[in-house]
Image (tube, rainbow, N blue to C red):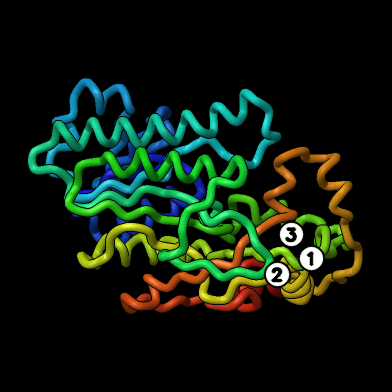
Amino acid sequence: MKVAIAGGTGFIGSALTNALLERGDEVWVITRSPRKITGGETREKLHGVTWDECAAQPGKLQGVEAVVNLAGETINQRWTAGAKKRIVDSRLFAAREIARLAERLEPRPHTVINSSGVSIYGTSETETFDEDSPAVESDFLSRVAVRWEEAAGAIPAGRVIRLRTGVVLGRGGAFPLMALPYRLFAGGRIGSGRQWMSWIHIEDMVRLILHCLDTPGIAGPVNATSPEPVTNDRFGRALAKAMGRPHWLPVPAAAMKALLGEMSTLLLDGQRVIPRKALETGFRFRFPDIQSAVHNLVGR
């Protein structure tokens, strides 16, 4: 399969690129920094192309069968007005450019997977959400997700999958920072500890994207989360056990709000999300529970 990946040099994109190459697919990474793309004799099926080249020479991607859009400014920064604008604009730009590209390709890609977030469901300590749950525009992140999916809906392709991703646990991304307090023997619950965390191991994240690419019947929203979401307190206890560290020092919600401002919602609020569509289409998680996931990443 010939696959284009926007955001292919990032944490998830790099892992996906490697997985596609390992199974013999041809990968075109769409990036602002093609120098980050390393080919060589063992990666002759890996190519880099800029957004400007896609716009000026769409024929470079002639024959692309699927596009995976993971591009977007990181949300792990203080949410100033400028940062919020970059977060929104980067996501809309990527979706719109992919729509323009798909319109100019013949044949058009049969599959587009566009990243989104579980934040689209809003936050709750009591409700459980699956792909049939309605979108709720209750805060900044949920509004971002709604606009992101609206832009993805305009991409002309045989099927468009909106991949609603939870917290991706791996040796990159946010997880090293989440584990840092425990490395320093200062880990504990954050706020009440009752807020839900819908998560997925990086290996399962990549495998789920491949599953979506390879399963023609999958379309629309797909929750990229493990089947066993956990509370913040349970996550901390599992991490502490895997690392052989104590789980004892709580961080008050007020302190997080003072330190991070509006971005503190990433740690103080959450949602319990179930990957119903993945399970119903036969996907099997290698790391379905939090203890096996964190032990794989940091266990002794």
Question: Would you place residue 275 above or below residue 213 in this image?
Answer: below
Q: Looking at this view, is 273 or 72 the one in front?
A: 273
Estimate how packed mark 1 is, as few (under 14), some (14 to 19) or many (20 or more) residues with alpha carbons within 10 Å: many
Residue at image location 62% in from the left, 28% down from the top: 83
Which callout, 3 or 2, points at the residue further toward the start of the chain? 3
The Cα atoms of the two marked residues, 2 and 1, are separated by 6 Å
Q: Amino acid at mark 1?
A: Gly
**Residue 29, position in %: x, y?**
33, 40
Question: Would you place residue 12 above or below residue 213 in this image?
Answer: above
Residue at image location 27% in from the left, 65% down from the top: 218
Q: Looking at this view, is 131 or 300 the one in front?
A: 131
**In the drawing, what numbered circle is on residue 231?**
2
Asked whether disc 2 touches disc 1, contact meaning CB atoms under 8 Å apart, the reply is: yes
**Residue 78, position in %: x, y?**
70, 34
**In the drawing, what numbered circle is on residue 179?**
3
Residue extending furthest toward the left = 106
Q: Looking at this view, is 122 or 195 the one in front?
A: 122
Residue bearing mark 1: 193
Asked whether disc 1 touches disc 3, contact meaning CB atoms under 8 Å apart, the reply is: no
Q: Looking at this view, is 63 or 222 the one in front?
A: 222
Q: Amino acid at mark 3?
A: Ala
Which callout, 1 or 3, points at the residue further toward the start of the chain? 3
Residue 33 visible: yes
Mark 2: which secondary structure? strand
Mark 1: which secondary structure? loop
Estimate how packed mark 3 is, as few (under 14), some (14 to 19) or many (20 or more) residues with alpha carbons within 10 Å: some
Q: Of circles 1 and 3, which is in front?
A: 1
